[in-house]
Amino acid sequence: MLQIFDSLARDRRVLVPIEPGHVRLYVCGMTVYDDCHLGHARVLVVFDMVVRWLRTSGYRVTYVRNVTDIDDKIIRRAGENGESIRALTDRYIARMHEDATALGVLPPDHEPRATDYVADMQSLIEQLEHNGLAYVAGNRDVCFHVRAFPGYGRLSGKTLDDLRAGERVEPAEGKRDPLDFVLWKQAKPEEPEEAQWPSRWGRGRPGWHIECSAMSTRLLGPSFDIHGGGADLQFPHHENEIAQSEGALGKPFVNIWMHNGFVRVDNEKMSKSLGNFFTVRDILARYQPEVVRFFILRAHYRSPLNYSDQHLDDARSALTRLYTALQHTAPSPTDPDWKVGAAARFVSAMNDDFNTPEAIAVLFDLATEANRSRSAETAGLLKALAATLGLLQSDPDRFLKAAPSQPEGVGLSDAEIEARIAARLAAKKDRDFALADRLRAELSASGIVLEDRAGGITDWRRA
């Protein structure tokens, strides 16, 4: 029974698809005016993992991941480059696909481009007007009247007054409330014609938020099972999606909201303004793509992901241990019995809100056993379970030849191991079990076997 942490309920919920056996999933994709960065890579890999596990679990999945191909930044970048918006967005969509393929990310079932759904956006806005939730502001933009929608702020957990006091809002002449957001932007004289569409409100283009409501409800229906994206989208983007979708269609929008954690560099959020910005291509110039995928998946998707060369080096070393087990013992084709042994533990981890750190710990247990027993069946189970995460499907010799050799004894020092064990015990005492599980999985990934004993004592040894 798969349980998923729902950001709206702020608790785990059992997945019960609206249509039995069929999960409909929408994820906010990229705004294509530049190369993908590591934060984008995390979204791509995390929800690829989610889809893979849903399908492994027997569900039929319809996965929609959109592309935002009209936006202020896109218009500005195309103007700076002296090229058309379409030329810019086509180029960066192609580069995004190259990055996703390198990271082992399977294509979504649908990848709608916002510019192909403008008519659907206009229909939603017209319905919001009819329902008394949209109005034409003094500057001729069409805005959503936030205070007219009951329950606004449920996802962010803030009241309207809190939001007005604490959040940056779009300035617009003639808004009824500073929190009101733009549904349709009136065309500006300096904007190119290709960034304008005719409408009953005059030439213009859609606001960002209405794009996802139109694409998701057109392709998945007015109500669907899971909506995902990065934690930075929770407010205002996803909050606004709920308001405008339910306000227009009069039905519950989404059953479960999933948000992956931020990517941090030296414990600060990665951003261009801080100068700690890394593109996928920057990283793939120095690390194998599967190492980057493994680095992303070894952390729980809701936890912050702290980027550093050391963490990527650790991920490469850990993945090398897994491939070495497959190199030493050729795996036999294996169809896992999901109800027993290591496979059952793997299922238990993945069904607990996609607990990939604990699932990866199972892989290391199997690698240790394969190294000890030289069992082709155990190696086959290791490869089969890893396949559900998109890992360990390359030829071991090819991977190990490409990976830089590691001197004997490289890894965590005894002091570093003891420090992580102490941090894990403190997390358990504080009932922060997600952190405790992650620390255990990190130690396991580094080849450290833990044995908990009575009295809060943990013994350890190197595998």
Image: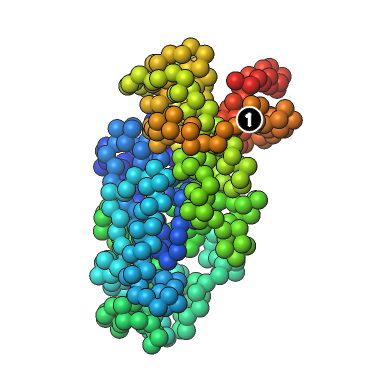
Quadrant in which the C terminus appears: top right
Label 1 crowd bin: few (<14), some (14–19), many (20+), radius 10 Å: few
- Residue 187's place in the image compared with 104, above or below, is below
286 and 34: which is toward the camera: 286
Residue 447, horizontal then vertical, whole percent = 59, 26
Quadrant of the rendered structure where residue 299 is?
A: top right
Q: Residue furthest bottom?
A: 189
151 and 20: which is toward the camera: 20
- Residue 449's place in the image compared with 15, above or below, is above
Quadrant in which the N terminus appears: top left
Q: Residue at x 66, y 21 (%)?
A: 460
Secondary structure state at the residue bearing disc 1: loop
Residue 174, horizontal then vertical, whole percent = 46, 84
- Residue 166's place in the image compared with 251, above or below, is below
Residue 65, horizontal then vertical, whole percent = 35, 53
Numbered circles on residues, count: 1
Horizontal side, residue 76 vs residue 406: left or right: left
Q: Which residue is mark 1?
A: 407
- Residue 101's place in the image compared with 172, above or below, is above
**Can see residue 148?**
no
Q: Residue furthest right?
A: 415
Q: How is the image coloured?
A: rainbow
Q: Residue at x 40, y 20 (%)?
A: 330
181 and 404: which is toward the camera: 404
Q: Residue at x 56, y 67 (%)?
A: 167
**Can see residue 52?**
yes
Q: Which kind of residue does numbered mark 1 sit on?
A: Pro
Q: Residue at x 52, y 40 (%)?
A: 295
Quadrant of the rendered structure where residue 201 is?
A: bottom left
Residue 124, horizontal then vertical, whole percent = 29, 68
